[in-house]
Image (cartoon, helix red, strand yellow):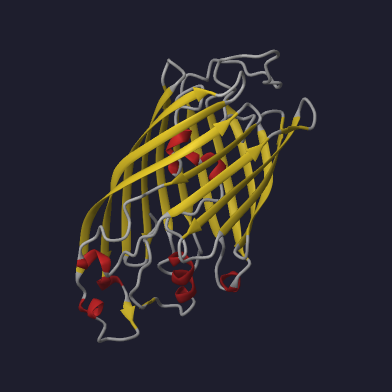
Amino acid sequence: MLMKHIKTTYRWAWVLAFFALVSVQAQKEPQYTQYMYNIGSFNPAYVGSVEDPEVTGLYRAQWIDIPGAPTTLRFGANIPFANEKTGLGINIINDGLGPSNQTVFSIAYSYQIQVSDVTKLSFGLSGGGSLLNVNYEDGTFDDPRDPAAAGEEINNFYPTVGAGVFLYEEDWYVGLSVPNFLTDGLYNDEVATVVEDKLQYNFIGGYVFDLSDRTKFKPALLVNYLKGAPVTVNLSANFQFLDAFTVGAAYRFDNAVSGLAGFQITNGLFLGYTYDYNTNGLGEFSGGSHEAILKFYIGREGKRRSRNTKETGPSKRKPKQIDSPRFF
């Protein structure tokens, strides 16, 4: 979704912005450091896997100090149904990059089956669309003969259809998804000059280790594969204390190192923050990237949550909240 492959040679006030654009061309979906809190944005099978409805708001400012660098706003809702088999998700993402602005919206539906007493497998589908706006008047060009230098503005809509699977228990999860199957050959000639969309595959996994009654260790992994681009590997490791405070670090291969922090303000409200420092050529010129997330858990406020969330004995109920203080 993130300003897919802007082909025009577009130069900002700083020459280093060129490297920023090259890097973005290798990612179609928005880049999150707190991907473990945003699974519903790229895997529709995740929706409905939670115990309580939740609403998520996220803001990411990437490559501070570089004009035209990416910014991302996301709003998401995850609504489990009472039958504990189905769920509904709403996802709205706005990405800005240089002269381009893209708003993607989708609705996801999931259906879950009981694989064992403690394991569930969820299948999800999503459908929606993308509004793409490109205003070339906002920049300068290396080649004034470039047709885009005429200052034309592009406004277009195109549909999106995605799918995913999500397998989980109380202490672990794995998921695989394709956010959009409608790629090459869909766009008209005007959009094709800006958008060169490819299939993207996302694999995510995570586990919770109980180090003590008050401490948990929670590693996670996200792998993105976009045809024609290098594989992106994200690793993170968080420690959670007293079911309330979370601190950790993350590494995006050949790209950035990150610090993560989170605080469960109440049972119904979580705040998370990350700072990324680029380990590639941008690190010397960029002020890094900031990302903040706020999650509201509807209906959980009055509940008391035990520090030991595991249930004893087999249960055919939905496994404990995947997106909970325990897991993330």
Up the image or down, 169 lies above or below 26; here it is above
Residue 137: which quarter of the image? Answer: bottom left
Q: Residue at x 60, y 42 (%)?
A: 205
Q: Residue at x 50, y 38 (%)?
A: 294
Q: Residue at x 59, y 22 (%)?
A: 320
Tell which residue pokes out farthest to the front in this image.
115
Up the image or down, 78 lies above or below 148; here it is above
Which residue is at the front of the view, 131 or 263?
A: 131
Identify the image quadrant of the C terminus: top right
Which residue is at the front of the view, 60 or 37?
A: 37
Could you tell whether 76 is left or right of 132 in the image?
right
Which residue is at the front of the view, 164 or 25?
A: 164
Q: Residue at x 67, y 21 (%)?
A: 309
Up the image or down, 1 lies above or below 87; here it is below
The x and y percentages for residue 156 are: 21, 57
The x and y percentages for residue 77 are: 40, 33
Number of marks: 0
Could you tell whether 91 is left or right of 250 in the image?
left
Residue 213: which quarter of the image? Answer: top right
Tell which residue pokes out farthest to the right in this image.
212
The x and y percentages for residue 24 are: 45, 65
Up the image or down, 146 lies above or below 203; here it is below
The x and y percentages for residue 163 are: 40, 41
Identify the image quadrant of the N terminus: bottom left
